[in-house]
Image: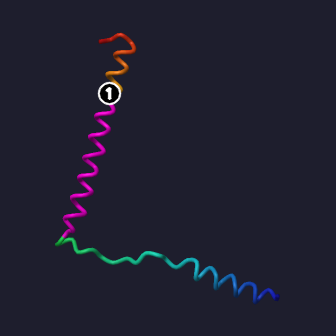
Amino acid sequence: MTLSRLLSRVGFVSRVGSRSAFTSSKTDTRSPNWLRVGLAFGSSAFLWGLLFKQHSTDVHEYKVRNGLQ
């Protein structure tokens, strides 16, 4: 196989491999998808709630183990 054929195949593979799997389109900011907005904020609030609950549980266990309560 000659060098020019090898380089042409490499160029073809790199062009095909660099094609993006995602398409970009501008979203309409005037009409948001309220279901997705609600799910995003709801899941964030749920995770923060779990974090605070775990923290208070850890603090209570620390106090019990060290005789601070």
Magenta segment, prevailing SS (helix, strand or loop): helix
Could you tell whether 29 is left or right of 8 in the image? left
Quadrant in the rendering for residue 61: top left
Asked which colour scheme the image uses, the reply is rainbow
Where 50 falls versus 36 (above or below)? above
Query: Is residue 33 shown in magenta?
Result: yes
Badge 1 marks a residue whose secondary structure is: helix
Where 29 falls versus 16 (above or below)? above
Could you tell whether 23 is left or right of 6 in the image? left
Please identify the residue farthest to the left as the structure is shown: 30
Where residue 25 appears, as percent x and y from the top left, is 33, 78
Query: In the rendered structure, which amino acid carries the disc numbered 1?
Result: Thr
Where residue 67 appears, as percent x and y from the top left, is 35, 10
In the image, which residues are magenta? 32-55
Quadrant that contains the C terminus:
top left
Q: Nearer the viewer, residue 8 or 61?
A: 61
